[in-house]
């Protein structure tokens, strides 16, 4: 059944071919290359049913004329070459062309070509390869059909990326880069100028739809947003309102950059509506198909639309081609006269009068030259493949029947150079060539294109001289690059917070403290290193200030002087007391116990040195505990002394045996020792179970590092402070109980003053510690140690020094006995 269907199909095609054959442009040869070229434009839009318009009734296409001439030029150059450099010695190439004026014409041409492959009668030449057609939309049918028979097809302008799929189109090649490279080039241009807010338009054919889809997919992973996307229909009476609505939507989105992925035919129908609605000052990114096409640039008033930057086929000088076109007019006239137009009884695709077109003297533009050179390379590629099949390297070709699949096999592997241009195909049948980047320039009303850069696909690289681009604003030419962004970039120190569905639309949020941002386009701020900080809205981090009390700071020097004076005061007092140890004043003060007090005060004074400079393991060990232990010994002596005085004057008569036993059995010394040893064990337990270590505090200040000892307020520390506080309270109570004792033994005011200085000093330290850390707090703690020691020295020892040194008459036994008698008389 399938064989019958194929036979009927080929019979129908053959009937059409036999009617039309002989009216087209052809050349007999040993091997025939078939070509499809858009010699006319016959739009089939609006037609219904299986109908094909007569191509000759369409409008003549100058670009298609140049393409046919490029085929003829290449074939004649190969055939007419003499000498050892001849590609196919003993053989000639022929060609058979079709007018691919419309999609139905391409389909019919494809069926005709396949019919010839099965022409057993030999009525027509068989194809070794097909060159063309021009557009991707037209190329799909022949690529799929010829691929089933491995008949090579080399297109010169079909760029659709799908044609690179070798599973569907195994025998398809092309001498123009794939749209994949074109898409990458367009994206690179958008990124170069930071155009992140764009509109994307695609023509309503496979070229535009596939290109628009590829571009949209690639942009999804970039920082470029598509504000508006639409399909441009072919121009007809029914699509005019669609075109106007499309332009209005572009205006509404307020984009300044529009990417138009369209064929030149559909683009030429779209831009008149852009001009009609006075759209100016925009940037239009064009594809290779329309960016340098005269069909678009020749639209009246198109210079007003703004700046056009396009991707173009890489221009290669094609010397001799224009001379060939001029010299071939006479040959074309002979071909035209040999045609018998009366034999054409059906509309067909091979009834072209090339001579009539040649007489129009069409201008040969850069786009025509580039595309014609692609045709030229395609012909040479087929010839080089034939050379390999026929084994012509020895200077003589073997006479053998050539099958298209043999040409196909060699096309995949060959690599050659023609006119200083390397020609080969990769595994997808694509060439390795890149693109020129062009822009439109206007001198008064004369249009021209200017190459301003280039793009190479592997590796991707864009070379662009933006100073060569004529930026056209709303009213006139400008030197400022147009901006096309939904939101301006955030300054350094601010991150982007997306607003709406597009990532390009955002508001700027300042980075919080301790973070920074030194680039644009980021949605999050970078945290600073732990040793650094930053204020809000920063673009860099600053090194934190390291806080401690160095030896050389002015504040430290002042405190060291005070410590030295306090230590001298303590040692001086001890010396005076030692020299007057047997006097009543020294005995009433506690006798030898005073030296224990003065020694503990001197030790406490030395403990303050552990607060200077950066903390170490040793200084942290002695910083708190050493002072607390030393001062506890002093307080224990004052407490026992106060208790002893109160017992003598108030409790001895009531508890005579208790006091006598306590005094005779060294009760004062034992009490002092027990109180001190208890504090010692608490301190040892604290530093053993939870030892203080040097640490860096990053949390108290954002901009500073505090060098301190860890476990500042540990449970052990609280136990030490609580024990010392209870001892202070007991000392205060006993001193207060002796407020009415004889003047020489009444120390309540002095001791109360000393304890108040001590308590206030350390309340100040704890208060400062909760609100501040660092140098000042450390200095306050050292000052608290000094004032605590001075409080005892001034409150307890200074009055006694005053009597010893300045009032020696009061430092006598008689004076003390007199005071005791007066106290006794007062009580009775």
Image (cartoon, grey):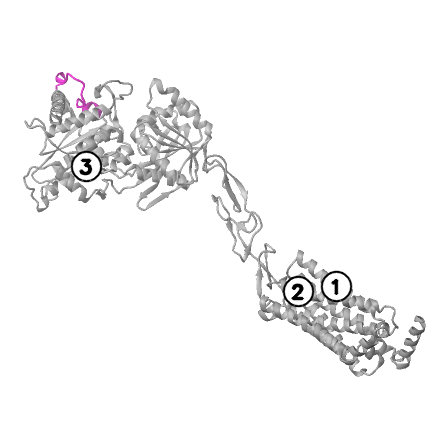
Q: Residue 355: within the magenta?
A: yes
Give the quadrant of the C terminus.
Answer: bottom right
Q: Which residue is mark 3?
A: 171
Stretch in magenta: 340-359
Q: CA distance from mark 2 to mark 3?
A: 92 Å
Q: Residue at x 88, y 69 (%)?
A: 740
The image shows residue 523 at horizontal and vertical percentages of 48, 43
Q: CA distance from mark 1 to mark 3?
A: 99 Å
Of 705 and 346, which appears nearest the observer?
705
Packing grade of label 2 (10 A; few <14, some 14-19, many >=20) is: some
The image shows residue 248 at horizontal and vertical percentages of 44, 24
Find numbered disc 2 in the image and state the secondary structure of the residue it sits on.
Answer: helix
The image shows residue 24 at horizontal and vertical percentages of 15, 24
Residue 656 relative to residue 612: left or right: right
Of the residues tagged 2 and 3, which is closer to the observer? 2
Q: Looking at the rendering, which quadrant does residue 236 occupy?
A: top left
Query: Who comes first in sequence, dot 1 or dot 2?
Result: 2
- Are dots 1 and 3 in contact, CB under 8 Å? no
Main SS category, magenta section: loop
Of the residues tagged 1 and 3, which is closer to the observer? 1
Q: Which residue is mark 1?
A: 759
Q: Looking at the rendering, which quadrant does residue 437 occupy?
A: top left
Residue 85 relative to residue 319: left or right: left
Find numbered disc 3 in the image and state the secondary structure of the residue it sits on.
Answer: loop
Q: Which residue is mark 2?
A: 719
Give the quadrant of the N terminus.
Answer: top left
- Are dots 2 and 3 in contact, CB under 8 Å? no
């Amino acid at each position: 059944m399938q064989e019958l269907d194929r036979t009927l199909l080929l019979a129908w095609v053959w009937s059409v071919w036999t009617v039309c054959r002989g009216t087209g442009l052809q050349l007999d040869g040993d091997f025939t290359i078939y070509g499809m070229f858009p010699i006319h434009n016959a739009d089939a839009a609006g037609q219904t049913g299986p109908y094909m318009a007569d191509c000759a009734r369409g409008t003549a296409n100058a670009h298609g004329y140049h393409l046919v001439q490029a085929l003829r030029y290449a074939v004649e150059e190969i055939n007419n070459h003499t000498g050892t450099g001849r590609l196919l010695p003993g053989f000639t190439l022929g060609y058979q062309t079709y007018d691919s004026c419309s999609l139905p014409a391409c389909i019919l041409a494809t069926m005709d070509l396949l019919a010839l492959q099965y022409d057993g009668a030999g009525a027509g030449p068989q194809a070794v390869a097909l060159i063309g057609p021009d557009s991707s939309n037209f190329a799909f049918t022949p690529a799929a059909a010829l691929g089933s028979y491995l008949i090579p097809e080399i297109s010169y302008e079909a760029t659709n990326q799908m044609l690179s799929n070798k599973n569907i189109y195994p025998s398809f090649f092309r001498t123009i880069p794939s749209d994949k490279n074109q898409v990458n080039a367009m994206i690179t241009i958008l990124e170069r100028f930071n155009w992140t807010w764009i509109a994307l338009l695609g023509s309503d054919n496979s070229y535009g739809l596939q290109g628009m889809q590829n571009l949209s997919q690639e942009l999804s992973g970039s920082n470029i947003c598509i504000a508006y996307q639409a399909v441009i229909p072919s121009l007809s009476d029914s699509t005019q309102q669609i075109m106007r609505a499309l332009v209005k939507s572009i205006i509404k989105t307020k984009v300044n950059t529009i990417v138009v992925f369209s064929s030149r035919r559909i683009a030429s129908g779209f831009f008149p509506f852009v001009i009609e609605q006075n759209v100016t000052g925009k940037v239009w990114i064009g594809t290779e198909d329309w960016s340098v096409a005269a069909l678009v640039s020749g639209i009246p008033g198109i210079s007003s639309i703004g700046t056009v930057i396009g991707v173009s086929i890489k221009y290669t000088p094609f010397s001799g081609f224009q001379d060939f076109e001029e010299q071939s007019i006479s040959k074309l006239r002979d071909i035209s006269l040999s045609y018998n137009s009366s034999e054409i009884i059906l509309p067909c695709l091979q009834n072209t009068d090339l001579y009539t077109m040649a007489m129009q003297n069409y201008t040969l533009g850069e786009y025509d030259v580039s595309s014609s050179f692609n045709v030229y390379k395609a012909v040479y590629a087929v010839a080089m493949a034939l050379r390999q099949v026929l084994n012509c390297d020895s200077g003589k070709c073997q006479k053998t029947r050539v099958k298209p699949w043999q040409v196909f096999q060699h096309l995949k592997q060959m690599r050659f150079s023609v006119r200083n241009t390397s020609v080969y195909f990769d595994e997808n049948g694509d060439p390795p060539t890149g693109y020129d980047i062009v822009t439109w320039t206007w001198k008064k009303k004369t249009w021209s294109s200017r190459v301003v850069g280039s793009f190479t696909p592997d590796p991707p690289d864009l070379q662009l001289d933006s100073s060569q681009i004529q930026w056209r604003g709303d009213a006139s030419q400008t030197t400022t690059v147009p901006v096309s962004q939904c939101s301006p970039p955030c300054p350094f120190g601010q991150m982007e917070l997306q607003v709406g569905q597009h990532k390009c639309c955002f508001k700027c949020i300042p980075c919080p403290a301790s973070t920074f941002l030194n680039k644009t386009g980021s949605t999050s701020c970078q945290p600073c290193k732990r040793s650094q900080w930053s204020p809000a809205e920063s673009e860099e981090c600053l090194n934190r200030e390291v806080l401690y009390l160095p030896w050389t700071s002015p504040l430290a020097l002042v405190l060291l002087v005070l410590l030295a004076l306090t230590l001298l005061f303590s040692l001086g007092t001890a010396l005076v007391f030692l020299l007057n140890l047997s006097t009543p004043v020294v005995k009433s003060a506690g006798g030898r116990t005073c030296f224990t007090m003065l020694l503990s005060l001197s030790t406490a004074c030395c403990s303050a040195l552990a607060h200077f400079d950066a903390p170490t393991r040793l200084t942290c060990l002695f910083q708190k505990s050493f002072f607390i232990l030393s001062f506890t010994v002093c307080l224990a002596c004052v407490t026992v002394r106060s208790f002893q005085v109160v017992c003598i004057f108030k409790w001895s008569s009531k508890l005579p045996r208790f006091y006598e036993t306590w005094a005779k059995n060294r009760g004062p010394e034992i009490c002092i020792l027990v109180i001190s040893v208890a504090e010692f064990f608490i301190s040892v337990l604290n530093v053993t179970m939870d030892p203080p270590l040097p640490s860096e505090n990053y949390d108290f200040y954002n901009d500073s590092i505090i060098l301190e000892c860890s476990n500042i307020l540990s449970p052990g520390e609280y136990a030490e402070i609580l024990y010392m506080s209870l001892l202070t309270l007991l000392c205060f109570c006993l001193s207060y109980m002796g407020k009415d004792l004889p003047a020489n033994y009444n120390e309540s005011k002095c001791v109360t003053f000393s304890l108040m200085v001590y308590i206030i000093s350390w309340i100040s330290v704890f208060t400062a510690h909760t609100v501040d850390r660092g140098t000042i707090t450390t200095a306050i703690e050292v000052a608290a140690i000094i004032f605590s020691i001075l409080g005892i020295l001034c409150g307890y020892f200074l009055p006694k020094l005053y009597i010893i040194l300045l009032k020696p008459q009061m430092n006598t036994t008689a004076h003390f006995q007199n005071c005791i008698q007066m106290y006794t008389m007062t009580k009775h």
